[in-house]
Image (spheres, coloured by chain):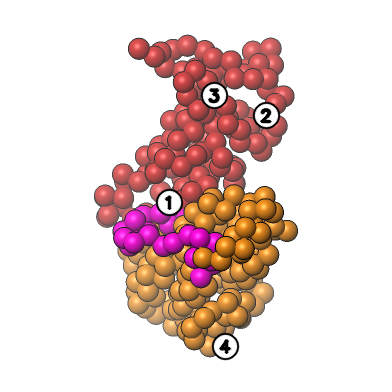
Amino acid sequence: MGKVAREVVEKAGVNVDELIKKLVRAASAEFTTYYYYTILRVNSIGFDGEGLKEIIEDARIEDRNHFEALTPRIYELGGALPRDIKDFAKDAACPDAYLPKDPRNMQEMLKVLVEAERCAIRVYTEICALTAGKDPRTYDLSLAILHEEIEHEAWFSEYLGEGPSGHFRRGAPGESPYTSRFLTVPKG
Amino acid sequence: MRWVRVGSASAFPPGSVTSVVAGSRRLALINRAGELFALDAVCPHQGGPLDHGVLWRGALECPWHHHRYDPATGANLYPANVYPDDLPHLQAQLKPARTHPLEVRNGEIFVGLPDEP
């Protein structure tokens, strides 16, 4: 724990215990989504060739990167991940991204993916709003993750025919162009 | 049922979610584009504070796990729209939020609550 790191955030008016709960829930959502996207990816057979599979793979690895990036901040602020992974998974900030009943239905799979990304966008928008001007480190981290979640939504939304994403997939799988500078282990 | 006054309608602007106490209950009072609704403040999923939630696309969103509810019916909208029905145990996570009837009388809001024993 960083005593001064926590103290300055408290003095800025942030309820640090509430912030830690939000960060743990966010970390859980990233961890569980990494798991569920693994299942979605292996089942996305022949959807737009292998195009959708590649995009799910980028989002999957970047969500794992988000978990890796969030974890040190939780401990710096005096928080901790639950000892029991079942408690951790149950507390995810976003619902689980289950494989649809018919895994051959691309539209159903895209609906799961885009809803998961839209939930993540709201999670990090809330954390950014909570920490803006008060906790620059958590804000900076959450903003970096938010950038990537917004890109993920746009990729899947494009496949649903909702309009162009405005950008292309990563140069390397799970590149995390915004979050990689927070990673303490090699990314991807 | 008994009717309990919870405040003036002008105190709940469109788009707001407000925590109110009515009798022994904490409620989320919602103004969705001029339509008023009252729901129990405790999220049926894991007990999150719905009265601290936000309106998003017309639905009330719990701040803890981001389940979304229809303010009019209490029905779970998300993740009910993506949870597969071949995993029936998931239905336990999709219980509806409890709604209460609401009336505006002369600019004052009254919520209908069940009689307490």
Q: Amino acid at mark 4?
A: Gly
Residue A85 vs residue B12: left or right?
left
Residue under label 2, please give it: B12
Same chain letter for marks 1 and 4: no
Q: Amino acid at mark 3?
A: Val
Residue A146 seen in the figure: no
Q: Position of residue B102 (x, y in %)?
A: 55, 21
Which residue is rendered at x = 47% and y = 30% of the image? B40
Who is closer to the viewer here, B77 or B52? B52
Q: Earlier in the sequence, mark 2 or mark 3?
A: 2
Q: Position of residue A116 (x, y in %)?
A: 48, 61
Residue under label 3, please give it: B21
Circles 2 and 3, Cβ within 8 Å, touching? The answer is no
Asked if residue A74 is among those painted magenta in the image, a careful observer would answer: yes
Q: Position of residue A32 (x, y in %)?
A: 39, 65
Residue under label 1, please give it: B79
